[in-house]
Image (cartoon, rainbow, N blue to C red):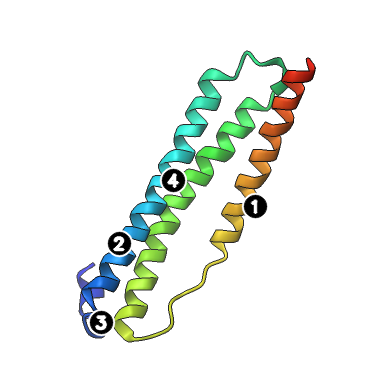
Amino acid sequence: MKKLLTVGKDPDPRFTLANERTFLAWIRTSMALILAAIVVATLLPEVKALNGLVTPISIALSLMGASLAFWAWLRWRKTELALRLGNSLPISSALFVLAVVVSLLGLTMLLVGVGLVVGL
C-alpha cells in the first residue's frame, strides 16, 4: 500500500473516494454471493427438483463470491494506479464472467422453480 502512495501524484480525492465506493460495492456483491451459497446449501437440499445440484450451485456461488472479492481488490489497485499516473481507467473481463455465471445460475434456479411448480 505504501508503495502505491509513492507512485505518480495524488489524484483528486473525489476520484479516490469513488474508487473506494466501487470497491465496497463489489465486496457487498461478493458477500451476497457467498450468502446465497449458504442459503442454497442449507435450505434447498430437500428439494427433489434440484436432484444433486445443491452442492455444485453452492460451490459455484462460493467460488464466484471469493473470486469477486479478490478481483475487487485488484480492480481497486489498478484503478488507483491509473488515477495516480493519469492513465486511462482499466477495463476488465471479470464483469463479463460475473454476468455469465450469475445468468447461468439464475437460469438454473428458474428451471428448478418451474420444475417445482410442474411437480417434477
* Amino acid type, residue under disc 3 in the picture: Val
Q: Which residue is mark 4?
A: 30
* Amino acid type, residue under disc 2 in the picture: Glu
Image height of 39 relative to 4, above or below: above
Where is residue 53? Give x, y as percent.
68, 27
The quarter of the picture where residue 48 lies is top right
Where is residue 15? Give x, y as percent.
29, 73
Residue 110 vs residue 70: left or right? right
Instruction: Identify the element where label 1 is drawn.
Output: helix
Where is residue 84? Give x, y as percent.
29, 81
First in sequence: mark 3 vs mark 4: 3
Q: Residues within 10 Å of mark 1 (few under 14, many from 20)?
A: few
Image height of 35 relative to 103, above or below: above
Q: Which residue is mark 3?
A: 7
Q: In this rendering, which labeled residue sits more in front, label 3 or label 4?
A: 4
Query: Can residue 51 be seen?
Result: no
The quarter of the picture where residue 95 lies is bottom right
* Amino acid type, residue under disc 4 in the picture: Ser
Instruction: Name the one closer to the observer, 106 or 82.
Output: 106
Residue 54 vs residue 92: left or right? right
Q: Residue at x 66, y 32 (%)?
A: 109
Instruction: Identify the element where label 3 is drawn.
Output: loop
Q: Which residue is mark 1?
A: 100
First in sequence: mark 3 vs mark 2: 3
CA separation in Å, label 2 and label 1? 25 Å
Locate the N terminus by quadrant: bottom left
Query: Residue 20, labelled with which disc?
Result: 2
First in sequence: mark 1 vs mark 3: 3
Q: In this rendering, which labeled residue sits more in front, label 3 or label 2?
A: 2
* Amino acid type, residue under disc 1 in the picture: Val
First in sequence: mark 4 vs mark 2: 2
